[in-house]
Image (tube, rainbow, N blue to C red):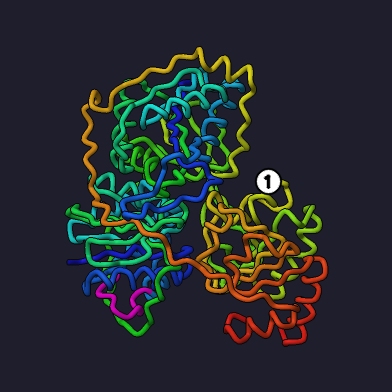
Amino acid sequence: MAVLVVADHDNASLKDNTHKVVTAALAMSGDVDVLVASAKVGEIAAAAAKIAGVRKVLTAESAELGQGLAEAVGDLIVGLMGGYDAVLIPATAQGKNFSPRVAAKLDVAQISEVIEVVSADTFVRPIYAGNALETVQSADAKKVLTVRPTAFKAAADGGSAATESVPAPGAPAKVHFVDQKIVKSARPDLGAAKIVVSGGRAMGSAEEFQKVIEPLADKLGAAVGASRAAVDAGYAPNDYQVGQTGKVVAPELYIAIGISGAIQHLAGMKDSKVIVAINKDGDAPIFQVADFGLVSDYKTAVPELMAALEAAGK
Amino acid sequence: MKVLVPVKRVIDYNVKARVKSDQTGVDLANVKMSMNPFCEIAVEEAVRLKEKGVATEVVAVSIGPQQAQETLRTALAMGADRAILVQSDQDLEPLAVAKVLQAIIGEESPDLVLMGKQAIDGDNNAVGQMLSALLDWPQATFASEVVVEGGKAKVTREVDGGLQTLEVNLPAIVTADLRLNEPRYASLPNIMKAKKKELAVKELGSLGVDTKPRLKVVKVTEPAKRSAGIKVETAGDLVTNLKTAGVL
């Protein structure tokens, strides 16, 4: 069987998510091609061609593809699916935007947020915010999957696949791109960060949240997160929210400060490799999932942690 | 302008889902059920469009068991004008849901479909996009701001790392993200009023839509449990442990 992987990129460079989805694809088949759909494919395609195990890189170039218009990207993929048995799409905001269109046009199910490839037709995916894992088998002739990149190791570089250009579809008639504002933050993206520092309701105010959480995050080169309670109380903006109704993260290190550990928050971070909890309430549920717990008021613990990191050369 | 808002009855977001011991699914017996949080945001947005005089009618639709009437009553109490329940005890996959909604849209001809980006049970995040593809209506997903003007909707969307603004011709499908608004609580007088609003019930079978499942659920299991680790005494011990664990 032949599998198509849709590359993740920011119109300038290829993102590591692509390497991770290639790993998932290689678990299904040895014939894996990568599609680069962008406003400017050059460097992105060159990077994709270097991923070990990739057979061929397909490129399509247009303004609408660069804008990520779901209608354009979806039509492009549907047009290519004659030659493929499955398409694997990174489960990013961008991937999730067009993937279901491909499934609907092919009249097949979408298998969402795959975290394990059991075989070429059987996959594991989290449901109920990761509180249950569903193993599903697809009888559809063609398979459309979104793949959660954090669940797979990145495929290494070392390949030298050929690149082939395919025609881009025409501009969609009923939707017009107005503008895009990508936040240029010095901090890493919450969804992709290796370390996340999150604050909870214990912070008490937005000023305190900024004063306590942000310097620690900056010291660690971490992204900033927050519990829903902190967001609801207005201490942190909504896009910081980690949890079932916010972002699901799985960093190497997750530091929860003044977070009690409500179910809906745990759902968003329990797949982190190492979890640290700092809370003055030793009975807080967060300690039940934490690898390292420090029962202490954050007001003393965080300055001490900053000092300890300083002493350790961080 | 008529706005259609699909809503789903799901496990309450504050309740922990428990896997059945026979691995056939999640145990929903005697569990608190509520309107899916993203659907609530969509209802709120539709009601605000009506309050601004942009929308003239807000119709809530749900596909589910008889108890989904309660979810629809919640939508009516929030300010929807009438409701439709497509009754079925079958748990439909997103493609089937999209096809059922397509049939309802054929009957109702709304100008805008406002819906949640995802239900917190299946976590698929697919129905809105599928519906857009089936109808060949434009889509604007993960909306954090919606402005309707002159037969178009200007939608600000949450994208990877920032915000994107699209303008879609109506009729269109817009899916709601968290930041779009904060849904209101229905007031007691409005809950009472909602009981008198029209709620039509249709049988799923009467729509003639193919809702056959495409996926076979092999099993549903519990994720590996995290066990509680150790308590450290000082911030210094914490840093030492984190270095040993290789994450600093």
Depth check: B214 or B162 in front?
Answer: B214
Question: Percent x, y for residue A55?
Answer: 25, 75
The magenta stretch is A48-57
Above or below, B16 against A298 in this view is above
Locate residue B8: give its quadrant.
top left
Q: Is residue A187 visible?
A: no
Q: Which residue is mark 1?
A: A232
- A49 magenta-colored: yes
Q: Is residue B123 visible?
A: yes
Question: Percent x, y for residue A173?
Answer: 37, 39
The residue at 79%/80% (across/down) is: A307
> Hey, which residue is sitting farthest top in the picture?
B196
- A93 magenta-colored: no
Above or below, A137 against B148 in this view is below
Q: Secondary structure at mark 1?
A: helix
Question: Percent x, y for residue A9?
Answer: 45, 65
Q: Chain of mark 1?
A: A
Q: Quadrant of the C terminus of chain B?
A: bottom right
Above or below, A229 against B36 in this view is below
Locate residue B200: give its quadrant.
top left
Residue B132 falls left or right of residue A1: right
Three-letter code for the amino acid on which mark 1 is drawn: Asp
